[in-house]
Structures are given as C-alpha cells and as structure tokens.
Amino acid sequence: MPPTSARLAYGYLRVLPGMGIDDVLRLQRDMASFAQENGFVLADVFVEAQWQQLKAWAEVVAHSRAKNVVHVVMPSPEHLHQIPVLAEIMKDEVEREIGGQLWLVEPLDETTASEQEAGRE
C-alpha cells in the first residue's frame, strides 16, 4: 500500500501583550501537538510579533494559497480578536480567505467558558 501524503497545516499566532519568548515557544509546541493529534503536519508557524499588525497573517494566507494548504492552526480565539463575538466573525472570514478550515487549539467555547468561570471566583 503506498504511503498517504501528509495533510499539511500552517500555524499562526499573535504575540499578545504580556507574552514572552517562552510563551511563544510553548504555544508553537502546543500547535504542533494539536496538529499531529488531528492528522496534520505543521509545516510552518507564522508569528505576528508586532501588536496590531497583519504582516504574518498576510504571509500565511499567501502561502496557504500558493501551496494549496487549507488548514491553519491557532492557539486560541484571542489570536484573532480579544472580543469573543468578533473572534468568531474573524474565524469565518479567515476560513473564507484560505478556502479551508481554521483549527483552534483552545476552541472559542472553552475559552469563553473558562474566562467566565475565572470571573466568578
């Protein structure tokens, strides 16, 4: 039986305020593990190092289109937007732009629920 080709995915993360290099490296490891658990090979991770810029995002979209990679992995919805409703809207827009699926290591619902739980304490 011939080997099946790996399903490639790109990773994207935004360096959020307060994140250090150790946080970025941990998130990259988390995305690689998530990709592997879901049958993907994380081909590259694009990091938006400057707050409120979209240079790395433009690169991941361009690479996705050029290489026909239709899966992008992100750590959590906050890497799209800090407001959950806007993060959901942006997720839909991202999927339209790449013609594929955006995978969140920490899904929108879990993030929102954990934030709500933290707020009750």
Image (cartoon, grey):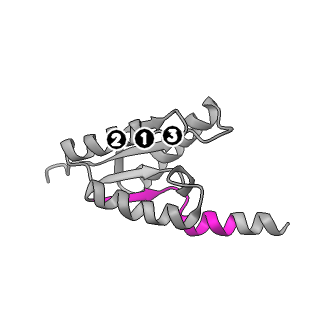
Q: Residue at x 14, y 50 (%)?
A: 2
Q: Nearer the viewer, mark 3 or mark 1?
A: 1
Q: Is residue 11 left or right of residue 63?
A: right
Q: Residues within 10 Å of mark 3 (few under 14, many from 20)?
A: many
- The reply to whether the magenta stretch includes residue 77 is no
State the CA–CA distance, disc 2 to disc 3: 19 Å
Classify mark 3: helix, strand or loop: helix
Q: Which residues are magenta?
A: 100-114
Pick whichever, 107 or 41, lies toward us.
107
Question: Could you say where residue 76 lies in the image, as x and y percent from the top left?
Answer: 54, 54
- Quarter of the rendering occupied by the N terminus: bottom left
Q: CA distance from mark 2 to mark 1?
A: 6 Å
Specify whether 2 is left or right of 18: left
Count of labels in the image: 3
Give the x, y percent position of residue 54. Answer: 42, 41
Mark 1 and mark 2 in contact (Cβ < 8 Å)? yes
Residues 64 and 9: in front is 64
**Sequence order check, earlier mark of 3 and 1:** 3
- Pointers 2 and 3 in contact (C-beta within 8 Å): no
The residue pinned by badge 3 equals 28
Which residue appears at 39% of the width and 42% of the height? 57
Q: Are marks 3 and 1 in contact (CB under 8 Å)?
A: no
Q: Residue 72 in the image: x percent, y percent?
A: 37, 51
Residue 45 showing in the rendered view: no
Seen at 32% across and 54% down, the residue is 71
Q: What is the residue that sits farthest to the right in this orientation? A: 121
18 left or right of 11? right
The amino acid type of the residue labelled 1 equals Leu
Residue that protrudes farthest toward the top in the picture: 21
Residue occupied by mark 1: 54
